[in-house]
Structure formats: structure tokens, C-alpha cells
Image (spheres, rainbow, N blue to C red):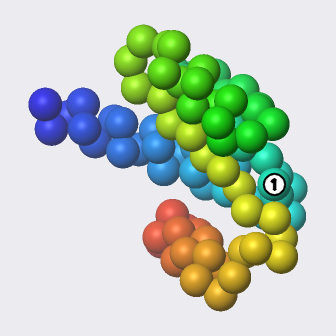
Amino acid sequence: MEVRTEKLENKIREFVIRYMNPEKFGGRVFLVHGNEAREYPDPGSARSAALSLPGISIIIQVPNRDEAGQYFTIFLRLNKETHSA
């Protein structure tokens, strides 16, 4: 069970790092299911789609550049430092 959990955590981390970029994807909502990511116009649409799919889905709502405050910037920097070490 622990190996599956690690794989899931790594997959979530990979997609968050890929899409959580306010400069490039600000204001967008992504639904990640398996190895596929789809874009949705709002969190409600993504949630409805996720509930209709079997298994685990991840919804990533990327803030606009203006919404990405100090703590979000710190999170991104720490994440990059963790992966570059």
C-alpha cells in the first residue's frame, strides 16, 4: 500500500508543478485523470466530470497572476528548491 501511496503522491506533485504556473495557466481549471489532463471553464464543471469518472481525479484551479500572493510564491520557490537539490 505504501508504494501505491508514494506513486500517487509523486503523480500529484508532478501535475501540480506542471500546471500551477500563474504566468502560463492563470485562471484555468484542470482535471487530471490517469495520465490525461483536461481544461474546464470553472471548478463546478471539473468537479461534475471528476465525479462521473472511475478512480481518482485531481482538480487543479490555477489562480490568476494577481491572486497568486506571497504564500503561493513561497510555495513555488520551495517546490523548485526541493526538486533541484
Residue occupied by mark 1: 27
Could one spot residue 74 in this view of the protein?
A: no
Given residues 72 and 41, the one toward you in this image is 41
Position of 31 relative to 65 (above/below): above
Residue 62, by quadrant, is bottom right
Q: Is mark 1 on a helix, strand or loop?
A: loop
Identified at 83% across, 71% down, the residue is 65
Identified at 60% across, 21% down, the residue is 49
Question: How many neighbours does mark 1 have within 10 angstroms: few (below 14), some (14-19), or many (20 or more)?
Answer: some
Position of 66 relative to 41 (above/below): below
Give how far across and how far down residue 54 sits, in percent: 42, 12
Identified at 25% across, 38% down, the residue is 5
Give how far across and how far down residue 70 sits, in percent: 65, 87
Position of 42 relative to 55 (above/below): below
Could one spot residue 14 in this view of the protein?
A: yes
Given residues 10 and 57, the one toward you in this image is 57
On the rendered image, what quadrant is the N terminus found in?
A: top left
Give how far across and how far down residue 53 sits, in percent: 50, 13
Given residues 64 and 44, the one toward you in this image is 44
Say which amino acid is labelled 1: Gly
- Considering every residue shown, the one lying at the far left of the view is 1
Position of 59 relative to 81 (above/below): above
Q: In this view, does 48 lie to the left or right of 23?
A: left
Identified at 61% across, 54% down, the residue is 17
Give how far across and how far down residue 47 sits, in percent: 57, 32
Q: Is residue 85 left or right of residue 37?
A: left
